Amino acid sequence: MFNAAYSWVKPTPVTKPALIAFSQSMVELLDISTTELAHYEFAEIFTGNKILKGMQPFAMCYGGHQFGHWAGQLGDGRAINLGEVLTNIHGRKMLQLKGAGRTPYSRTADGLAVLRSSIREFLCSEAMFHLGVPTTRALSLCLTGEQVNRDMFYDGHPKLELGAVVCRVSSSFLRFGSFQLPAARKDLSLLKQLVDYSISTDFPSLLSDNAGVFNGKLYLSWFAEISNRTCSLIVHWLRVGFVHGVMNTDNMSIIGETIDYGPYGWIDNFDIHWTPNTTDAQGKRYCFGAQAEIGQWNLFQLANAIFPLINDAESLNLILNQYADNYQQQWLAMMTEKLGFAQYQGKDDQQLFTDLEGLLSVIETDMTVFYRQLAKLETKKELLQEQDWLPILVPCIYDFAELTSSLKEQWSQWFSRYIKRCQCDNNDAEVRIALMNRTNPNFVLRNYLAQQAIEAAEQGDYSEIVKLQKILLCPYDEQGKYEKYAQKRPEWARNKAGCSALSCSS
């Protein structure tokens, strides 16, 4: 579609819409009543069967770099925007249906989604929000009554799966690729319209600071803000152990939210080279440890796209270079809090951080469990014996046969250095523990937990979805009877489909 940022489109009707899960906080934010939620019409609306007065459904047109290669026009192949809601407190919110049928950008696909991927999107959107990670939200999860044909691992074994639709919510679904496509087509008029619209609606304070004038200075400020938000987002991902899995430029939000929950995954054992995406298994372009670098690469592509509006390569490059400095500062600040220090104290701290990550990588050590355990370490002693620090590692290590005497000695030295560093802060233990426990989550949406919820739901049992929602409302808290959900991945889930690796098929 040339000279267009979107196309009007109607969702595909479905036979038997049924609401199976919803976000209570999103219901409240959108001022939806309990009566409306319980009514059959709710499922009709949020599967696309019924269009309310004032709704004008549309699909967005954009391009993107996929795995480093320009893919040309892409667009919302299975996402349909119903329209915006003006909330009393949180401003504009766009309601978008994912899996509601074909659009002009579906290419050869059917525009539908299956229950498996929809559960993952629904749960992860809300889990990330309560973890404090910028994200699109999820209002509802509905079955459609349809059967959808999918080849989960693209291995020639397709099967029919239950169809589903998630209603996603955000103040903006614009992506880096939204600006790349008109730039690639040299449609500078549309490019400027889109940038001006983004600034006016999503970054109005920038416009006010620039006296309401759209010019190169304003566009640079806009790009700098996007760069800062992207950097902060990725540092959050690393803090909680999240791997997006497919950081193509069409999957990068212009407002710095996590968007498009496809083959994502959560780090179990700390491995900077791990990727949950089977398509990325060989190249590992989007692995855990590469996400910050890819964020900068994607920003470079956005800079190329908006260059014709600015014509100042030096200023754009300065912002891109500042991204690297900003990332380093934010990563160090994040690690300082993860380890419970009052403030960053220079290169010795940085060495302590990098040495820790090196130790975590030597043998399979659960990242999430380790940082919660570390908060329990007694830090008043000057010298440590093995019995003092080994209980910290016991719940984290996947194979104790790999914990050699040499490695034990390395861990003992690191723990001793850590204790001395904690003592330098001269803080009460309660202060350190509180800082660590509000930085390091106790619960994350581990892949195997999501898969268990999927398997139960495919049999008509949605109780595990509800239970995970409840647990993930307070991911930093100790939650008594649910503590088994905070333990490291069970061995049976190591190589199980959906628990260790996923594809883009949904």
Image (spheres, rainbow, N blue to C red):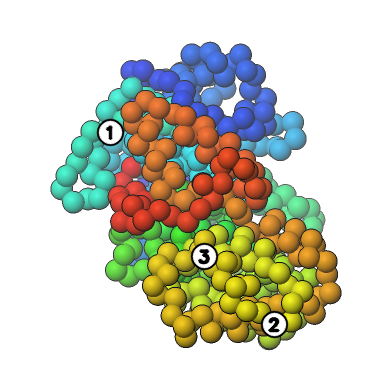
Q: Which residue is mark 3?
A: 394
Does dot 2 land on a helix, a strand or a loop?
loop
How many marks on residues? 3
The image quadrant that residue 413 belongs to is: bottom right
* Residue sitting nearer the eye, 439 or 177: 439
The residue under the point 47% across, 29% down is: 463
**Mark 1 or mark 3, which is nearer to you?**
3
What's the amino acid at mark 3?
Answer: Val
Marks 3,2: beta carbons within 8 A? no
Residue 149 lies, in percent from the top left, at 23, 35
The residue under the point 80% across, 62% down is: 431
Q: Which residue is mark 2?
A: 383
- Tell me the crowding category of disc 3: few under 14, some 14 to 19, or many 20 or more residues within 10 angstroms, Cα based: some
* Residue 319 appears in the rendering: no
Q: Is residue 441 above or below residue 84?
A: below
Quadrant containing the C terminus in the rendered view:
top left
Q: Which residue is mark 1?
A: 161
Q: Is residue 143 above or below residue 196?
A: above
The answer for how far apart the CA atoms under marks 1 and 3 are is: 40 Å
